[in-house]
Image (cartoon, rainbow, N blue to C red):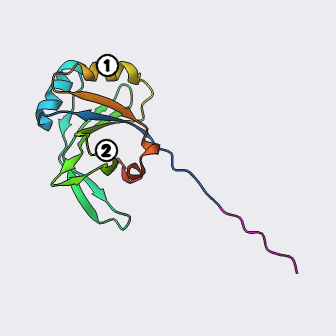
């Protein structure tokens, strides 16, 4: 009797966003005002907070979120506060205060965008992160 072959199907989830970490001592609304003024985005407070959930779908934490949809470039921006009620959205990056996610980016050159972001008075530092190198980003989903 011959042995049965075992086939294992594996796939890598493709991350559909770019991630920028922002350090700032200012409140979220003041940071957003500075970004909107300097970079000419139109980030607005979302009606709902970003909910961080576990694999069972249970809410772990809720984080304030600002959004802007650039219809012309079909690009979505999400600014999410990392720390909320003592819990972190991205625990591996505890020193980061906010994360700016660029979804479906085919038009913004990140080096220039980072340079502009660093020139905002409320921004102490801004860093680009590879979401695939941070395990907790697999839970980040934007609808």
In the image, 57: left or right of 119?
right
Where residue 71 appears, as percent x and y from the top left, is 34, 29
Give the residue drawn at x 23%, y 34%.
23
Give the residue drawn at x 38%, y 54%.
139
Q: Is residue 30 magenta?
A: no
In the image, 120: left or right of 54?
left
Q: Is residue 108 visible?
A: no
Give the image quarter of residue 9.
Answer: bottom right
* Residue nearest the viewer, comparing 127 with 120: 127
Residue 95 vs 121, above or below: the answer is below
Rounded to the nearest angstrom, the CA distance separating label 1 from label 2 is 21 Å
Q: Name the residue tied to disc 1.
A: 115
Where residue 115 appears, as percent x and y from the top left, is 31, 19
Residue 88 vs 111, above or below: the answer is below
Q: Secondary structure at mark 1?
A: helix
Instruction: Read off the magenta span.
Output: 1-8
Q: Name the residue tied to disc 2.
A: 93
Labels 1 and 2: the sequence-earlier one:
2
């Amino acid at each position: 009797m011959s042995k049965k072959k075992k086939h294992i199907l594996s796939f890598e989830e493709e991350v559909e966003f770019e991630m920028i970490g922002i350090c700032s001592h200012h409140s979220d609304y003041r940071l957003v005002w500075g970004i909107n003024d300097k970079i000419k985005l139109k980030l607005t407070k979302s009606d709902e907070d970003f909910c961080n959930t576990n694999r069972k779908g249970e809410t772990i934490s809720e984080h304030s979120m600002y959004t802007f949809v650039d219809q012309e470039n079909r690009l979505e921006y999400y600014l999410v506060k990392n720390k909320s009620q003592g819990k972190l959205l991205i625990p591996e990056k505890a020193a980061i205060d906010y994360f700016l996610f660029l979804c479906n980016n085919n038009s913004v050159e990140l080096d220039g965008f980072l340079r502009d972001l660093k020139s905002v008075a409320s921004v102490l530092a801004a860093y680009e992160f590879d979401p695939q190198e941070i395990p907790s980003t697999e839970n980040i989903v934007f609808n």
